[in-house]
Image (cartoon, coloured by chain):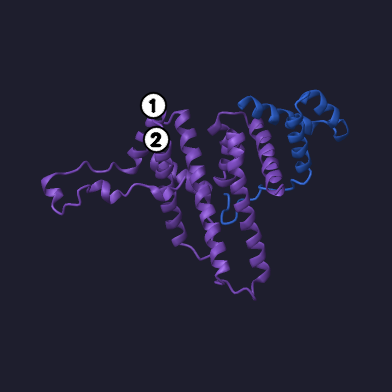
Chain colours: A blue, B purple
Amino acid sequence: MKGDSNREIAIFTEALKVSPRERASFLQRTCGRDEDLRRKVEALLKAHSRLGTFLEEPPPGASHD
Amino acid sequence: MDLSLAPEFDQLQNPNGAQDADELYSPPRLMDNMSDATVTLDAIEAGDPKAAEQLLILVYDELRRLAASKLALEAPGQTLQPTALVHEAWMRLVGDRNPSFKDRTHFFCAAAEAMRHILIDRARQKKTKRHGGEYRRVDFEDLDLAASTADDQLLAVNEALDKLALEHPVQADLVKLRYFAGLTNEEVSEVLGISVSTVKNYWVFSRVWLLNEIQDE
């Protein structure tokens, strides 16, 4: 479980540094036959493109000082 | 966890309900909150499974009290300052003890979880009031809509965070510390014992994970 968590985060974080054109082959190499992991990371990379300032502002009702 | 299940302090102080109990027998008084907190931190260290819950209740009560006293001094519609509240609670509950690294971790994670409860409760209350028509919708329609969207998003993030905690517990703690308690990357790094660059990586991952979760429904 912990290993899976770390692996998903590590591959996602590395994938962000790879140019979008090379991401598919990067995921092929790093995820190997783990289809489930590859799909998870792909979904996250997609979400990353619309991240914007999501959660960067304090929650409603709060201000950070 | 249902925090309303906190023990009834009156009952603890006077378990028999006898009027003259004090004259016959003086039950041990509750310790003040500061020693409660340090005793609880020691109990967590010693592996007492109930202690983490006790710490959360203690910190939650303290933060709620501090928040209420701050809000009482200000105009309606004001915001809370979670960072200041959490640091004040730390000073009040643990302040004069020389804390270990683990004490800090336990305390700040509990405080961040408590802050989350407080802010979510406020968002839910606002939502209820809004549906009850307490605000004047005609005059403030746009403002109302924006506030409503922000509160709805907060509640969605709150639910998604529970799912994140199941798969990635450290990252969920990090979100609570950064987002709900308002700690900086440096402070989070200290509390969780990970490097600042790891905090930054985890923060991006967690935001993306939560966004994907709430937009995936």
Q: Answer whether residue B186 is visible to the viewer in this image.
A: no
Q: Residue furthest right?
A: A21
Q: Answer whether residue B55 is visible to the viewer in this image.
A: yes
Q: As shown in the figure, which amino acid type bears the numbered disc 1?
A: Ala
Residues marked 2 and 1 touching at CB (< 8 Å): yes
Residue A17 is marked as: none
> For mark 2, what is the residue?
B51
Q: Residue at x 63, y 62 (%)?
A: B148
* Between B159 and B188, the one nearer to me in the picture: B159
Q: Where is residue B15? Give x, y as percent.
A: 22, 47
Q: As shown in the figure, which amino acid type bears the numbered disc 2?
A: Ala
Above-or-below relation of B164 to A9: below
Q: Residue at x 40, y 38 (%)?
A: B94
Q: Where is residue B75? Give x, y as percent.
A: 50, 65
Q: Residue at x 58, y 49 (%)?
A: A64
Relative placement, left or right, of B68 versus B130 is left
Q: Where is residue A27? Give x, y as percent.
A: 80, 28
> For mark 1, what is the residue?
B46
Q: Chain of mark 1?
A: B
Q: Secondary structure at mark 2?
A: helix
**Nearer the N terminus, badge 2 or badge 1?**
1
Q: CA distance from mark 2 to mark 1?
A: 9 Å
Q: Residue at x 65, y 76 (%)?
A: B138
Above-or-below relation of B10 to B190: below
- Residue B25 position by quadrant: top left
